[in-house]
């Protein structure tokens, strides 16, 4: 419950990455952007791309040189702005929208 409250993944990062990679290999991205992507800041888009890699907040923060708390704040804003229920929803939005996902 602590992980979920902190906005972290409920699965281990390794399992999350495997699920994301399997999803990505299916080629399910439509390339049709989510209607609310235009309302995101550049930083929010960057965070969304990193969330789609399956990394935890700490790992994203390390890569972007920001604190995990800042990552959590951005993830919360993304959930609200995109109407996603959880991180998995954000991942689906990123892939369906055809966003360029960085290599974790």
Image (cartoon, rainbow, N blue to C red):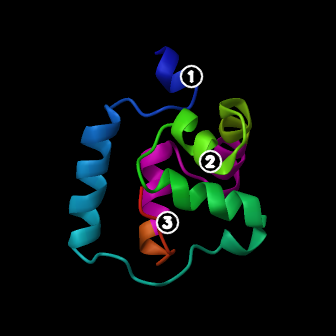
Q: Earlier in the sequence, mark 2 or mark 1?
A: 1
Q: Secondary structure at mark 3?
A: helix
Q: Which mark is residue 79?
A: 2
Q: In the rendered structure, which segment of residues is drawn in magenta? A: 74-94
Tag 1 residue: 5
Name the residue furthest top: 2
Q: Quadrant of the C terminus?
A: bottom left
Q: Are marks 3 and 2 in contact (CB under 8 Å)?
A: no
Could you tell me how far apart the alpha carbons at marks 1 and 3 are, in whole angstroms?
22 Å
Q: Which mark is residue 88?
A: none
Tag 3 residue: 94
Could you tell me how far apart the alpha carbons at marks 3 and 2 are, in whole angstroms?
12 Å
Please provide percent x and percent y for residue 54. Answer: 41, 48
Instruction: Sort mark 3 into few (<14), some (14-19) or many (20+) by Cα contacts within 10 Å.
Output: many
Relative height, residue 16 to residue 82 (above, below): above
Q: Secondary structure at mark 1?
A: helix
- Please tell me which residue is depicted at 31% across the width and 31% down the height of the picture: 12
Instruction: Sort mark 2 into few (<14), some (14-19) or many (20+) by Cα contacts within 10 Å.
Output: some
Q: What type of secondary structure mainly makes up the magenta span?
A: helix
Q: Earlier in the sequence, mark 1 or mark 3?
A: 1
Q: Is residue 92 magenta?
A: yes
- Please tell me which residue is depicted at 47% across the width and 68% down the height of the picture: 101
Q: Earlier in the sequence, mark 3 or mark 2?
A: 2
The reply to whether residue 40 is visible in this rendering is no
- Please tell me which residue is depicted at 60% across the width and 41% down the height of the picture: 62
Relative height, residue 65 to residue 95 (above, below): above
Please provide percent x and percent y for residue 97. Answer: 49, 75
- Please tell me which residue is depicted at 74% across the width and 37% down the height of the picture: 70
């Amino acid at each position: 419950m602590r992980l979920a409250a902190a906005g972290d993944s409920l699965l281990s990062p390794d399992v999350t990455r495997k699920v994301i990679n399997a999803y990505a290999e299916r080629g399910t991205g439509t390339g049709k952007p989510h209607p609310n992507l235009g309302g995101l800041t550049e930083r929010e888009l960057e965070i969304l791309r990193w969330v789609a890699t399956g990394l935890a907040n700490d790992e994203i923060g390390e890569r972007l040189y920001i604190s995990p708390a800042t990552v959590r704040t951005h993830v919360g804003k993304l959930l609200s702005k995109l109407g996603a229920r959880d991180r998995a929803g954000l991942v689906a939005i990123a892939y369906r929208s055809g966003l360029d996902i960085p290599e974790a």
